[in-house]
Image (tube, rainbow, N blue to C red):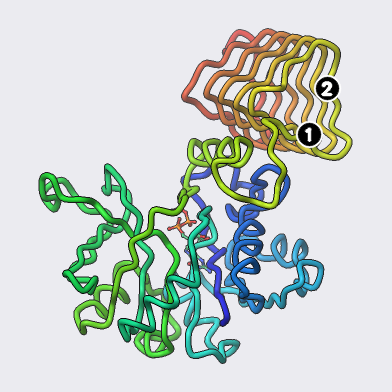
Amino acid sequence: MQAVILVGGEGTRMRPLTDTRPKPMLALVDRPIVEHQLDHLRRHGVRDVILSCGYIPDAIEAHFGDGASLGMRIRYVVDPEPLGTAGAVKNAEALIDSDEIVVRNGDILTDLDLGALRDAHRASGAAGTLTLTPVDDPSAFGLVRLDPQRRVTEFLEKPCREDLLPGEPYLINAGTYLLSRSVLDAIPAGRAVSIERETFPLVAAGGGLFGFPSDAYWRDIGNPAAYLAATLDVLSGAIRTEIPHDGRWLGDGAQVGDGADVDALAVIGRGARVGPGASVRRSVVGEEARIGPGAHLVDAVVGARVHVGEGARLEDVVVGDGAVIDAGARLVGPLSVATGERVAAAQG
Ligand code: GTP
């Protein structure tokens, strides 16, 4: 089986962290989000992968190359202009030679059983099978309704309140699909097409779309809060990954000063330095960042090369790459600091 991973979106909800890299290339502890997906695919025997790129494609190809170092075959296609989630699959068509394709969004973390998905797909004779996950609030997702045979009867992208039936178990599109080639044929070429808004409603109307509900670990990493939550899940072992988890992760060359506290779920990126007496809790510190002596970070995501001055306090804050937070500043969020911005102590 082959897989197509969609990695070309601009990731606007993830700004400022996506000012400088595509969302699927954000490090989730020690490796990009999409590399966790590649690990997951390989565990399930899928080694032939096409990465469908758009926004900052070079960063992706520079990291993965031909995939040999991961024991996989990785190829790339690049949207000539943003093609949307179905257009980006269509754009990979020339490289697809299997009859069944795993298609997934490049910004989800899941431990889904792909073999069981394939079995369900074959048993139902579906054109497309969507993995579904239960949620309390489906308003930010694609709400899917099924008949008793698990055939999709309705696909409502970002439903509004009037669309929801009280007491209904909400199953949403979990962003991993098994598609037969006939679905590719249903996507028009050469223009932007949304798989959620156009392709799935069309295939569902023809009776060929089925759901595969799953309780496996699943998280959509769409915004900084979800990114931090996914990081903490990896550190605490809530999701199986290839990373040993002991509550914190120090990248190569990271340094932690005397008396600093980084034990409670923290990632200190490669070459970053945490000063003496500082504390970093439930937070991510990017590569080569500097956290000054006595600074205090809680629920913070700090980008690469950020400088946080002595005694500064950051709580529920996202800081773009290269920003400077002056000594003594107090930032209590939710708020975000732009890439390269300087925050003076008085502003905080
Ligand atoms: P937002 O701008 O915050 O909505 O993020 P996004 O651009 O990543 O969009 P969304 O989260 O809906 O995308 C789901 C997945 O599809 C992500 O992995 C995106 O990288 C990918 N994706 C979205 N749009 C495109 C596109 O036009 N082309 C390609 N190649 N991939 C896309």
Proximity of marks 1 and 2: CB atoms separated by less than 8 Å = yes
> Residue 179 falls in which quadrant of the image?
bottom left
Q: Which residue is mark 1?
A: 250
SS class, disc 1: strand
The image shows residue 274, relative to residue 271, as above or below, that is above
Identified at 29% across, 68% down, the residue is 197
For the residue pair 207 and 24, the one nearer the viewer reads as 207
Q: Earlier in the sequence, mark 1 or mark 2?
A: 1
Mark 1: few, some, or many residues within 10 Å (few <14, many ≥20)?
A: some
Confirm whether residue 310 shows in the render.
yes
Q: In the rendered structure, which amino acid carries the disc numbered 2?
A: Val
The image position of residue 100, as x and y in percent, is 48, 85
Mark 1 residue CB less than 8 A from any atom of ligand 1 = no
How many callouts does the rendering have? 2
| Quadrant occupied by the C terminus | top right
The image shows residue 167, relative to residue 105, as above or below, that is above
The image shows residue 254, relative to residue 292, as above or below, that is below
Query: In the displayed structure, does residue 244 sit left or right of residue 129?
Result: right
| Quadrant occupied by the N terminus | bottom right
Q: Which residue is mark 2?
A: 256
> Residue 253 falls in which quadrant of the image?
top right
